[in-house]
Amino acid sequence: MAVDITERRQMEEALRQAHQEQEALINSIEGIVWEGDAQTSQFTFVSKEAERLLGYPADRWINEPEFWRNHIHPEDQRWVIDACLEATKAGQAHTLEYRMIAADGRSVWLHDLINPEVEQDQLRKVHGVMVDITARKQMEIALRESEVKYRTIFALSPDIIYLTDPDGNLLDANPALLTRSGASLEQIRQMHVLDFFAGKNPEALQRILTQLQTGQEIRDFTVEARTLEGEVFIYEINAIPITAGGKVVQILSLARDVTSRKRAEEELAQSREQLRHLAARLQAVREEERTQIARDIHDKLGQTLTGLNMHIAWMAGRLRKEKPALLERTRMMAQLVEFTIQAMSRISTDLRPGVLDDLGIVAALEWQAQDFQSRTGIQCEFVYTCGELQMAPEHATALFRIFQETLTNVARHAHATAVTARLEEDGDAVTLKVCDNGRGITAQERMNGKALGLLGMQERAQLLGGTVSVEGGLGWGTTVGVMIPLNATKDKEDEHASDPYC
């Protein structure tokens, strides 16, 4: 007897193909596809993705009754099992997010979509898909932690923190801003950020806002701001644009109160300026006194000594030769007076060289170079490319004294055998460069705060709007550069200048 089973074979083949397609579809899903018996609460099918995600083969899920329960994270175990049983018994589809412990000890977050299958009011099977959401959960946790930190900083920061839209309208502010401004959060949200600024240059503030709107950060921008009562404070602002989709959507700013520091800096600057004026006055008084003393020594003491010398010469001419001891004493007195006259002349010149007042700065510098060479034996060449300079007296004195101090330093410290000084006129200023071939100055010596000679030279020049630079190195000598304006005094700060904070 032969039975036609073609149709049955075709059905079996179709089922086999459908099964293969179903298996391929299940294996292509990036998640664990599973099926369980609702009555026994046992897994009857688990896809191969289980081994890739968690490291356990699928047959362990099926053959070990307590496998799934035992590998749920201890912190999630109780509530997950209870929630799953309750929803399954009710025949309701539901989702759970929980952690399972992988074979390597990692905690893997799963999004489990559970769908009970009910036939004729009987719960038969349960189907589900477990999807790995670890990356998303880690991002959510990090975002929550970041939000907590941000809110903590936002609330507790002594610095002012505020959030605006790209146009500068205030959206949020921390308690520090509310306390300082005296406004409520509702009032703040009705205001523009520029409403707080009290600067005299609103255009600069608008330019800053425009920079932020284009995505540029702002660092250490100093500005004045006022409270609702009109009290003015100084702030240092840092602002960061927040972008989304390539566009600036919000601007987060932090303002630090630097009022005390700025006031202290202003007071310090004023104090320094006062000290500079005092130092300048002391220098002027000192030069006036030295000039007066030099004149008194030269004129009064010089005349007296010259007269005394003439009287001694007259007396020596009338002494008898038979009194040689008395005659010798007279000659010794004449020599002593002559020595005193020379010493007096040297002291007078050291106090205030007459050549500076009589012949000008160029002749005075040339004379000083020659005097230095004769006293120390160090060759000193003075070169100048300008004619006689017309300098204000205090400027000429400063340049001469700096040159004197430079040559003194060469004699004391440089161990040089030659010095070259070059004087040039440069527009409204005069420059002097003094180079020696000595051992050279070191960086440590240049920065030494106890080097009063260098400090004095720099201070003299700065009082007149000039500069002093010192360059050199071991083995290649030292060069001192001096720049002094010819006549113009140092410009004073304009008291009515634009607001320095904007």
Image (tube, rainbow, N blue to C red):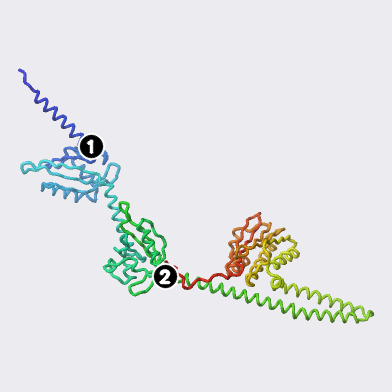
Residue drawn at point x = 32 percent, y = 70 percent: 179
Q: Which mark is residue 28?
A: 1
Residue 411 in sight? yes
Q: Quick one: 85 or 196, which is closer to the camera?
A: 196
Question: Compared with residue 87, is residue 204 higher up or lower down, i.e. above or below?
Answer: below
Answer left or right for 208 relative to 64: right
- Residue 183 horizontal/vertical position (percent): 30, 71
Please tell me how crowded label 2 is: few (under 14), some (14-19), or many (20+) other residues with Cα within 10 Å.
some
In the picture, the disc for residue 453 is: none
Horizontal and vertical percent position of residue 257: 39, 68
Amino acid on which disc 1 is placed? Ser
Quadrant for the N terminus, please: top left
Which quadrant of the view contains residue 153? bottom left
Q: How many numbered tags mark residues here?
A: 2
Which quadrant of the figure contains the C terminus? bottom left
Between 114 and 389, the one nearer to me in the picture: 389
Mark whose residue sits in front, 2 or 1: 2
Residue 296 in the image: above or below residue 500: below
Q: Which residue is mark 2?
A: 259
| 201 relative position to 166: left or right | right
Residue 414 relative to residue 119: left or right: right
